[in-house]
Image (spheres, helix red, strand yellow):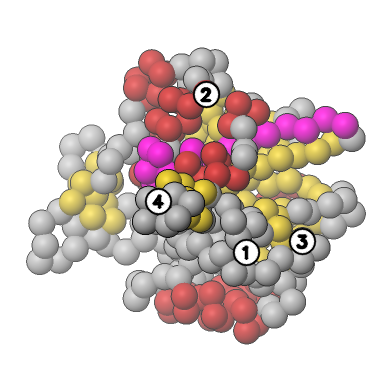
């Protein structure tokens, strides 16, 4: 699931686009009673991650989109069996990454399904722009998730999944001087009052070492900063090469557009082979990345698969 769906995007040896005829739905105004609906796009993100080691394939779900039925609808149209999912990872607690958990539970049942989260994923948050009434964001309920059957695993530190083949970064070190996080209207509840929550400390990424190529880094929103996250993953693993960066980079809107030039410059120095910036990256950052990394950058779209081979 991504913010956009473009049924005309071409693929290549790394990028597999869904067929243009995906998603047949009933439509009585057509003679056959059917039309091609394509895939859902919404302001949210979800990625199905398959890790192949020899003959063994492990499937993880990284985030679930914003709506209860969006992710599962796309899975149906793509012929993806969500029953293969062996674990869930949440990049952070914002509702546009966790809304599809209800659809997942309703579709396949989740009794005992492990879900890895940062301990601050339950933080109450709101947006309080100057001159406007504050708007509280939907907050995840641990009780509700465990009652549904999820096995919630909290990890502040880095953790390894899939027999050590997948790294979840946990809390990301903030080392750059330009990635300062969310602006003052983004607030968190500290137990006694609301205060500015710039860091979104529960932000974490998924990392896989693709043998002989380098690291794949998968982000949800990248609230910790795309460069902070990439460098953090390289430090944690000792791998010296960023192979691919996929996911939201949160560079859209006036508060973040000044961060675009130093971010693009730092990512250019890292020289990834593939950049598929998605979700909250913003069109100005997309354009800047496409210009700076013409061989690496590819447009993201709901239903796209990226094949990264050792």
Residue 108 tag number: 2
Mark 3–mark 4 distance (CA, rounded to whole Å): 34 Å
Q: Which type of secondary structure does the marked residue at label 3 adopt? A: loop
Q: Residue at x 43, y 32 (%)?
A: 103
Residue 276 tag number: 1
Mark 3–mark 2 distance (CA, rounded to whole Å): 30 Å
Mark 3–mark 1 distance (CA, rounded to whole Å): 11 Å
Mark 1–mark 4 distance (CA, rounded to whole Å): 34 Å
Q: How many marks?
A: 4
Residue 62 located within the stretch drawn in magenta = yes
Residue hosting label 4: 27
1 or 4: tag closer to the N-terminus: 4
2 or 1: tag closer to the N-terminus: 2
Q: Residue at x 33, y 28 (%)?
A: 141
Over which residues does the magenta segment extend? 55-72
Give how far across and how far down residue 45 sits, in percent: 48, 51
Q: Quadrant of residue 7?
A: bottom right
Residue hosting label 3: 14
3 or 2: tag closer to the N-terminus: 3
Position of 8 relative to 262 (above/below): above
Residue 133 located within the stretch drawn in magenta = no
**In this rendering, which labeled residue sits more in front, label 1 or label 4?**
4
- Asked if residue 168 can be seen in this view, the reply is no
Tell me, yes or no, whether the two marked residues, 3 and 1, touch with CB atoms within 8 Å. Answer: no
**In this rendering, which labeled residue sits more in front, label 2 or label 1?**
2
Position of 40 relative to 295 (above/below): above
Q: Label 1 crowding class (10 Å Cα cut-off): few <14, some 14-19, many 20+?
A: many
């Amino acid at each position: 699931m991504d913010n956009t769906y473009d049924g005309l995007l071409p693929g290549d040896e790394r990028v597999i686009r869904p067929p243009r005829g995906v998603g047949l739905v009933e439509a009585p105004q057509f003679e056959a009673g059917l039309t091609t609906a394509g895939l859902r796009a919404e302001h949210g993100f979800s990625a199905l991650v398959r890790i192949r080691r020899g003959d063994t394939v492990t499937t993880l779900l990284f985030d679930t989109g914003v709506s209860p039925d969006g992710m599962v609808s796309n899975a149906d149209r793509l012929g993806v069996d969500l029953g293969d999912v062996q674990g869930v990872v949440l990049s952070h607690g914002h509702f546009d990454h966790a809304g599809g958990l209800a659809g997942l539970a309703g579709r396949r049942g989740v009794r005992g399904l492990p879900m890895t989260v940062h301990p601050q994923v339950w933080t109450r948050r709101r947006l309080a722009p100057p001159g406007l009434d504050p708007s509280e964001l939907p907050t995840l309920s641990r009780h509700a998730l465990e009652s549904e059957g999820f096995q919630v695993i909290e990890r502040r530190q880095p953790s390894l999944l899939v027999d050590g083949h997948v790294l979840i970064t946990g809390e990301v070190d903030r080392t750059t001087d330009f990635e300062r996080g969310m602006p003052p209207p983004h607030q968190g509840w500290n137990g006694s009052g609301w205060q500015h929550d710039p860091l979104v400390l529960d932000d974490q990424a998924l990392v896989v070492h693709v043998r002989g190529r380098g690291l794949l880094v998968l982000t949800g929103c990248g609230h910790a900063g795309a460069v902070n996250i990439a460098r953090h993953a390289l430090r944690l693993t000792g791998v010296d090469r960023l192979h691919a960066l996929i996911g939201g980079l949160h560079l859209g809107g006036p508060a973040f557009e000044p961060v675009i030039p130093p971010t693009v410059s730092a990512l250019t120095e890292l020289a990834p082979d593939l950049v598929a910036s998605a979700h909250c990256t913003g069109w100005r950052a997309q354009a800047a990345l496409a210009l700076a990394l013409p061989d690496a950058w590819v447009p993201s779209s709901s239903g796209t698969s990226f094949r990264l081979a050792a």
